[in-house]
Image: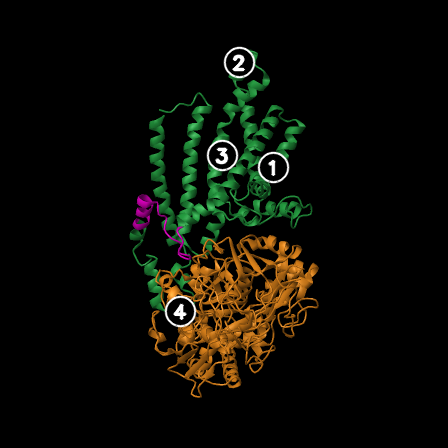
């Protein structure tokens, strides 16, 4: 098992370098704005632009720029500095990370709990009214774009602009360390919006997976042994049916940690997604690279964790 | 060099979708008569807002979708930065909110004394103005001199200094050190010695934040860093300051990039030395969020303003339901179609006139929101700019290609024939490259502009990119030789005709390095020479007339197709007595705004 994890970690590292190279090339080949002229402003003298270009290292060849960047990451975990503000990308990411982690992990708890509960209940009574209503609702939520849903819940329930002024609205986010209660209440609507679409997908996934599992021979055996239906479903059915959920959960959390830009914008949560969006509009390559690298890191780590969890949850899975 | 409010695209405003056309219905007129501002009843404008406020004290919350571009007074040049700059810094001169042409002495004690040959400027500095903590000492002329000198420091890289201060002796070769033409004979006197008689322009530019005093003894260590860190440790001379820690550090205390900024009262500000009332105790600026949500929060909330561009759907909502909370400001820049005067088919003046005649400029303005937020642009100088009336006023010069804002194909055909296309259609075979901007409503404008070209027989290739890419990779890069840029716009930094016309249309100022702002590569020798001569004209009226004549020549050459003198919408909560700045696209002035 340990060999397997080490091997996966090493492959993860190779993958990260590949992603770094890809992003590095992509943002220099595509027609993005020139960072030196953006920083220089209008009608700037060629001398000043040349100095800015040299300061940013943009006067070096692409391989040289990439090598300097890679060396900085591998030897010093230095992700570079913002072309615009000069701030360290690492510090910017760490500054924004808590907000995004709060949003995504809290949302994940909501969508996994809701999705699995609805999925299990639907799977136990397939084609019943409850099942049809649940799956119909899931279809609706899957079809609702996050941005639109965010606006709708704000217009309905936000304390400042809602029709029913119940929950704190946009711009109310405070860090957990500042005020845990306000942190929790400020994230209720964002969690709902982040979770809605995913919960619907998870419910449908859980339902189909559990229906298939409940038809297996070992489930019939468990029932024949006289186990309670609750124990059969939870310990033998759900435990086996949960693998596809775990796989997709890791990917979803990893992706969302780097790209929750719409929800972060609508609710004005200063997270990684908004940082990335602002960086894209300013052609701030180091920040874009940093956020993408971080998202890739999350996805790789989450996948490794999922593989380990497989072995724990499904006795048939063993790594060597 | 000049502030262009074009950098940050309102990507998410796309969701506001068809709001543009809906908004057009608010204020569009069926008549093509151009009568100017026409602010609807009940809507505020900076020109007639009361300058006295509500009560003294309280905290104003500002909800801004966009972050500052720069908070260093030596670098700041965007309208979004200006309100914070002019609340915290005192340039030598500044405008009162309802004025855009006559500056008021600010850090200066009186108007500048200009020598009769236009080559020397003497300015007396006000006594008794102190820097905020941790510097605390009195401001002297040396601090103003250092502020002007540091603008040339590559670590500060002010984009104005060559354009406006280039005539000051030593400035063209300056790199941040002492400049021979900037002298301080005593503690309260500043002298500027020029190599050319351009004192009027140099003096007019001293309303910009780069003339706000910076203490060399404190700032030099920050200016030595690449880029300068002074903005993050700045000290104030105005009524307010960015909240700072004991060492003066603003970054992370009073300014968190992308998150928030806090302006608090400057404890060293002496009201008796200033004309600003400064009613508010504190200004909390929240950065980020969606413009549709921000707009509703402001309109329905309390003690709030938005100080960047509201979503079109919000302007419509404000117009229909919260009219007394809506301000519409003229003098908010322009939009025109840049057409390549130096390369390709549009080197032919008659083709340029044909394009102007064919274009449905009313449709383009309707896409932008109709007459509530646009004025049909008929020439290049703006309303509120000296020389505007002499250049033709709202109606514009009497030329047939300017007569029909809905487009007139008969006139267009006439000019196509004069251009050498007897069929009235272009048969040259060249496919025109049109580069427009994404966002809202730019793509729609770009499509209307492209359709007009197609009607004239041109084949076109339309490319829509992010606005910053449009400027820095295509329309601002000479070597790209883009034929048509339909979404370019301009906002001058101060009320002088030269600031409106010189950079976009003077061929001598074309730069090849990607920061070019003469997007149409307009380079006509006669006009260039007229501009060089007009720069040196002394006296307000003579100067205005000289630039009005240039405006008429530009129209005669049809150097670009004008379509919109922008009006800017601003919104506030019902219990805010907002005062907008006519000189800064109507943005709410923190020095004058108060709570009811």
Q: Nearer the viewer, residue B298 or B596?
A: B596
Corner quadrant of residue B104: bottom right
Q: Is residue B503 above or below residue B590?
A: below
The residue range painted magenta reads A67-88
- Disc on res. B151: 4
Of helix, strand and loop, which one carries label 2?
A: helix
Pick whichever of labels 1 and 2 is earlier in the sequence.
Answer: 1
Neighbour class for label 3 at 10 Å: few (<14), some, many (≥20)?
many
Q: Which chain is orange?
A: B
Pick whichever of labels 2 and 3 is earlier in the sequence.
Answer: 2
Q: Would you name the residue on which mark 1 appears?
A: A139
Of marks 1 and 3, the one in the foreground: 3
Q: Nearer the viewer, residue B66 or B421?
A: B66
- Whether residue A73 appears in magenta in the rendering, the answer is yes
- Chain letter of mark 3 equals A
- CA distance separating discs 2 and 4: 83 Å
Whole-percent x, y for residue A66 in the image: 32, 50
Q: Which chain is green?
A: A
Neighbour class for label 2 at 10 Å: few (<14), some, many (≥20)?
few
Of helix, strand and loop, which one carries label 4?
A: loop
Of helix, strand and loop, which one carries label 3?
A: helix
- Chain letter of mark 4 equals B
Corner quadrant of residue A138: top right
- Can the viewer see residue B311? no
């Amino acid at each position: 098992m340990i060999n397997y994890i080490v091997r996966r970690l090493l492959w993860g590292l190779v993958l990260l370098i590949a992603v770094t190279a890809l992003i590095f090339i992509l943002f220099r080949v595509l027609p993005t704005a020139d960072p030196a002229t953006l920083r220089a402003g209008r009608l700037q003298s060629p001398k000043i632009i040349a100095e800015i270009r040299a300061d940013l290292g943009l006067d070096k060849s692409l391989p040289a720029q990439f090598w300097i960047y890679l060396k900085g990451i591998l030897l010093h975990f230095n992700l570079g500095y913002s072309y615009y503000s000069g701030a360290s990308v690492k510090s910017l990411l760490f500054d924004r990370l808590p907000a995004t982690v709060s949003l995504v992990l809290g949302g994940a708890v909501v969508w996994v709990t809701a999705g699995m509960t609805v999925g299990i209940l639907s799977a136990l009574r397939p084609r019943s009214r409850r099942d049809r209503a649940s799956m119909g609702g899931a279809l609706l939520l899957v079809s609702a774009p996050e941005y639109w849903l965010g606006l709708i819940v704000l217009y309905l329930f936000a304390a400042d602009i809602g029709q029913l002024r119940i929950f704190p609205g946009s711009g109310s986010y405070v860090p957990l360390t500042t005020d845990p209660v306000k942190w929790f209440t400020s994230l209720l609507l964002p969690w709902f919006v982040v979770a809605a679409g995913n919960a619907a997908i998870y419910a449908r996934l859980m339902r189909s997976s559990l229906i298939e599992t409940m038809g297996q021979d070992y489930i019939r055996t468990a029932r024949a042994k006289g186990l309670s239906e609750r124990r059969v479903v939870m310990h033998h059915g759900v435990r086996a049916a949960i693998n596809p959920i775990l796989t997709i959960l890791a990917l979803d959390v990893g992706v969302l940690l780097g790209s929750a830009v719409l929800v972060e914008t609508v609710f004005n949560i200063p997270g990684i997604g908004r940082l990335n969006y602002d960086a894209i509009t300013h052609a701030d390559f180091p920040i874009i690279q940093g956020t993408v690298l971080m998202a890739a890191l999350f996805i790789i780590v989450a996948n490794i964790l999922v593989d380990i969890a497989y072995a724990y949850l499904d006795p048939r899975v063993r790594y060597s | 060099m000049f502030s262009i409010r074009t950098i940050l695209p309102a990507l998410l405003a796309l969701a506001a979708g068809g709001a543009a056309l809906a908004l057009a219905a608010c204020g569009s007129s069926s008549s093509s008569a151009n009568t100017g501002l026409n602010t609807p009843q009940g809507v505020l404008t900076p020109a007639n807002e009361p300058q006295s406020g509500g009560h003294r004290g309280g905290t104003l919350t500002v909800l801004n979708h966009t972050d500052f571009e720069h908070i260093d007074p030596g670098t700041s040049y965007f309208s979004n930065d200006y309100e914070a700059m002019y609340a915290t810094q005192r340039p030598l001169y500044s405008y009162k909110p309802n004025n855009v042409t006559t500056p008021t002495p600010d850090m200066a004690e009186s108007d500048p004394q200009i020598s009769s040959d236009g080559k020397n400027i003497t300015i007396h500095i006000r006594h008794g103005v102190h820097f905020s903590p941790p510097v605390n000492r009195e401001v002297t002329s040396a601090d103003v001199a250092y502020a002007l000198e540091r603008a040339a420091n590559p670590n500060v890289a002010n984009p104005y200094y060559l354009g406006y201060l280039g005539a000051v002796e030593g400035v063209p070769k300056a790199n941040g050190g002492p400049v021979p033409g900037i002298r301080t004979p005593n503690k309260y006197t500043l002298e500027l010695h020029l190599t050319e008689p351009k004192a009027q322009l140099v003096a007019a530019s001293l309303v910009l934040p780069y003339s706000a005093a910076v203490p060399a003894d404190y700032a030099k260590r920050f200016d030595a860093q690449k880029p300068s860190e002074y903005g993050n440790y700045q000290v104030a001379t105005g009524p307010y300051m960015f909240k700072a820690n004991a060492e003066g550090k603003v970054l992370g205390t009073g300014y968190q990039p992308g998150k928030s900024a806090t302006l608090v009262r400057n404890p060293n500000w002496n009201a008796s030395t200033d004309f600003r009332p400064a009613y508010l105790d504190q200004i909390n600026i929240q950065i980020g969020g969606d413009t549709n949500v921000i707009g509703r929060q402001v309109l329905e909330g309390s003690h709030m303003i938005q100080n960047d561009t509201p979503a079109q759907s919000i302007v419509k909502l404000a117009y229909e339901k919260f009219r007394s909370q809506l301000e519409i400001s003229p003098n908010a820049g322009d939009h025109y179609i840049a057409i390549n005067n130096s390369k390709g088919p549009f080197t032919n003046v008659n083709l340029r006139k044909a394009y102007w005649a064919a274009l449905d400029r009313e449709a383009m303005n309707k896409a932008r929101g109709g007459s509530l937020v646009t004025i049909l642009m008929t020439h290049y100088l703006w309303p509120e700019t000296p020389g505007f009336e002499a250049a033709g006023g709202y109606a514009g010069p009497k030329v047939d290609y300017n007569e029909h804002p809905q487009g007139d194909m008969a006139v267009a055909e006439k000019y196509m024939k004069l251009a050498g296309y007897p069929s009235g259609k272009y048969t040259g075979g060249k496919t025109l490259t049109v580069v427009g901007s994404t966002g809202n409503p730019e793509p729609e404008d770009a499509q209307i502009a492209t359709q007009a070209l197609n009607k004239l027989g041109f084949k076109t290739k339309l490319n829509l990119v992010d606005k910053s890419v449009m400027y820095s990779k295509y329309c601002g890069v000479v070597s790209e030789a883009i034929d048509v840029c339909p979404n370019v716009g301009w906002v001058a930094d101060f009320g002088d005709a030269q600031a409106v016309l010189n950079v976009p249309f003077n061929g001598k100022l074309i730069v090849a390095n990607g920061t070019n702002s003469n997007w149409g590569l307009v380079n006509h020798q006669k006009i260039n020479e007229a501009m060089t001569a007009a720069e040196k004209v002394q006296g307000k009226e003579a100067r205005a007339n000289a630039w009005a004549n240039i405006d008429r020549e530009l129209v005669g050459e049809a150097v670009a197709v004008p379509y919109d003198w922008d009006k800017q919408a601003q919104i506030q909560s019902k219990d805010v007595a907002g005062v907008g700045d006519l000189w800064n696209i109507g943005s709410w002035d923190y020095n004058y705004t108060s709570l009811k």
